[in-house]
Image (spheres, rainbow, N blue to C red):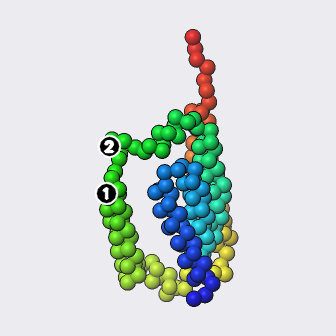
Amino acid sequence: MNINLLLFYVLAFTAVGSAILIVSMKNLVRSLFLFFVTLFAVAGLYVFALADFVAVTQVIVYVGGVLVLMLFAFMLSNKVLLNDLQSGFKGVFSIPSWQAGMVSLALFTVLLTVVWQVATNQPQWITDAKEKQLLIQHHDNTIHHLGINLMTRFILPFEVVSIFLMMALMGAAHLARKEKRLQ
């Protein structure tokens, strides 16, 4: 077993193990920090999948932005909200442990079935890429190709998405501001 395979298994075990601990813990602070570990492990797995841009984006956007936002929301929230989060959902949304386990086992079975079918019968686009030798190699610079495609072939969708994101930011700022009450 070489060091790459060992590192892959460590990252995969860390991602899956910390994700299982996230959903099983009752302490919200520990779950947030385990979410941090999970996101870093997934970023490491993206590096092994030769998706270096996605790995860097994962770290910048999710670890740097979303997780810090969640930590600040937790720290600035009031005690009553935190007590409600610890007690969990009641009524319609509550699921007993055995039912949640059954749903998880069913989804895991579907996942294994799909992986087994793809391993035995590869999709046509994968076999075509292998025949034309269009597979991504470890020495390819995917960020360079991605940048060229974003600024040439996909410039219009790229700009449309940026305008949608700006509109969402403006809408969030409008909803978040406090308006003075009229008397």
Q: Nearer the viewer, residue 119 or 89?
A: 89
Question: What's the distance in space between the residues labelled 1 and 2, CA to CA?
Answer: 14 Å
Q: Residue at x 57, y 72 (%)?
A: 11
Q: Is 167 rendered above or below residue 26?
A: above
Q: Is 162 rendered above or below residue 37?
A: above
Q: Nearer the viewer, residue 108 or 28?
A: 28
Q: Residue at x 54, y 67 (%)?
A: 15
**Quick one: label 1 or label 2, which is nearer the N terminus?**
2
- Left or right placement of residue 18 versus residue 178 in this view: left
Do residues under tags 1 and 2 come within 8 Å of each other at their CB atoms? no
Q: Which residue is mark 2?
A: 92
Q: Residue 60: tell me if it is visible.
A: yes
Give percent across and percent down for residue 99. Answer: 31, 57
Q: Residue at x 61, y 70 (%)?
A: 44
Q: Residue at x 68, y 70 (%)?
A: 144
**Amino acid on which disc 1 is placed:** Gln
Give percent across and percent down for residue 168. Answer: 57, 42
Q: Which residue is mark 1?
A: 99
Q: Secondary structure at mark 1?
A: helix
- In the rendered image, the residue lying farthest to the top is 183
- Bin the neighbour count of mark 2 within 10 Å (Cα to Cα): few under 14, some 14-19, many 20 and up: few
Q: Secondary structure at mark 2?
A: helix
Q: Quadrant of the N terminus?
A: bottom right
- The quadrant holding residue 48 is bottom right
Give percent across and percent down for residue 134. Answer: 55, 81
